[in-house]
Image (cartoon, helix red, strand yellow):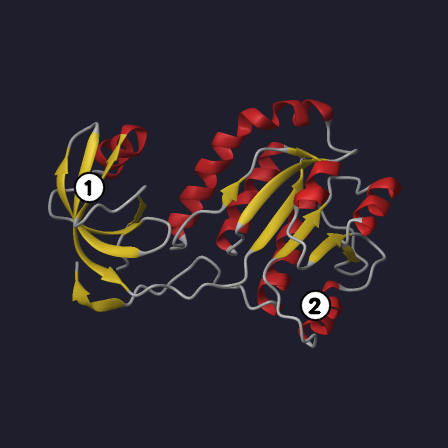
Amino acid sequence: MALRRIFVDSISGSSASLRGQAAHHLSRVVRLRKGERVELSDGSNVYLAEVRRRTPDEVQFAVVEQFSSPQQALPITLQLAIFKFARMEWAIEKATELGVGIIVPVAASRSDPPLVHAAPKRCERWRRIAEEAAQQCRRVAPPQIAEPLRFADAIAAGPVSLRLFLDTGAPALSEVLAANAKSDSPLSAATLMVGPEGGWIDSELGQAVDAGYRPVSLGSLVLRAETAAIAALAIASHLLGTSASGHDESVPETQTA
C-alpha cells in the first residue's frame, strides 16, 4: 500500500513539521499515529519519514531517508477562462492530476461578471483542491494557482516558448504539436489557453495571435469548457512528453538522511 504523501514547507536537517490547519487535519481527521511512516515533499525532493510527535496544533516528523530526485519535465501553464465554479474546480483537480505546472484564471469577455468578481476570493479554495489532488496522484508539488488576470494581462504574461490558444475551426492540436516536435528548437515551456462557455470573441482571438499564440482545436465537436481544457491538456502532456510532470516514482537513495 502506498504511503500517504504530505507537503511541507521545508526539511530542516533530519526533521520537519506542520502546524495550523494542516496539522489539525492530520491529527483529528487522518489520525496519524506516532511512528507511522509517510512521504514528505518539500516541493523539490521526496523523503521517507516517521511521525515523531502529534498534537492538534502540530505534527513533527523524523526523516528516515531521501528518495531519488524525480525527472523534471516540460512545464505547462494552463490559462483557464473563468466559468462556473463547480465545473472549474473539477477542471483544476483533473489538470493537477495531469501534471500542469501553473493554472491562471482568466477574465475573458464572455466570463460571467459575477464570477469574475468572486474569483479572487476562490483562489484559496482552488489551491486546497490542487494540493489534495497533487497528494492523491503523488506529485512532488501542487501546481501554482495564480491570481486571476484580465485577458490582455494573461496573454502578455504567458511563457513565450510555445503558446497555444484553443479555438474552433483551427488546425488540430495534435497536428500542430506533431509538427512542432520536428523543430530543431527545444521547448522550455508551453502555455495552453482555454476559453469560457460561449467561446472567445473575435478581438480576443486577434489579440492572442498578435501575442504569438497559435490557434488549435480538438475537432468538430463543441465541448464544455472543462472538458476541452482536460482533453487538450492530456493531448499536450502526452505529445510534449510531460505526462509525468511533477510526479515521481519514489526510489530511495542508498544514503540515509
Residue at position x 42%, y 49% in the image: 134
- What residue is drawn where x is 54% and y is 64%? 242
Label 2 environment density (alpha carbons within 10 Å; few <14, some 14–19, many ≥20):
some
Question: Where is the C terminus found, in terms of image quarters?
Answer: bottom left
Report whether 155 appears left or right of 58.
right
Mark 2 lies on a secondary structure that is helix
Give the numbered dot on residue 177: 2
As drawn, the residue found furthest toward the right would be 202
Front residue of 113 and 79: 79
Q: What's the amino acid at mark 1?
A: Leu
Q: How far apart are the two marked residues, 2 and 1, measured between alpha carbons? A: 45 Å
For residue 56, which quarter of the picture? top left
Which circle marks residue 32 in the picture? 1
Q: Which of the marked residues, 2 or 1, is nearer the chain's N terminus?
A: 1
Q: Quadrant of the N terminus?
A: bottom left
Specify whether 96 is left or right of 256: right
Q: Nearer the viewer, residue 57 or 133?
A: 57
Asked if residue 8 is positioned above or below residue 71 in the image, the reply reads above
Q: Give residue 63's position: percent from left, percent from top.
A: 17, 52
Q: Name which residue type carries label 2.
A: Leu
User: x and y percent of residue 41 in the render?
Assistant: 31, 50
How far across and how far down the image is residue 213, in percent?
A: 76, 53
Q: On the picture, is 177 further left or further right than 118? A: right
Residue displayed at 28% across by 28% down: 20
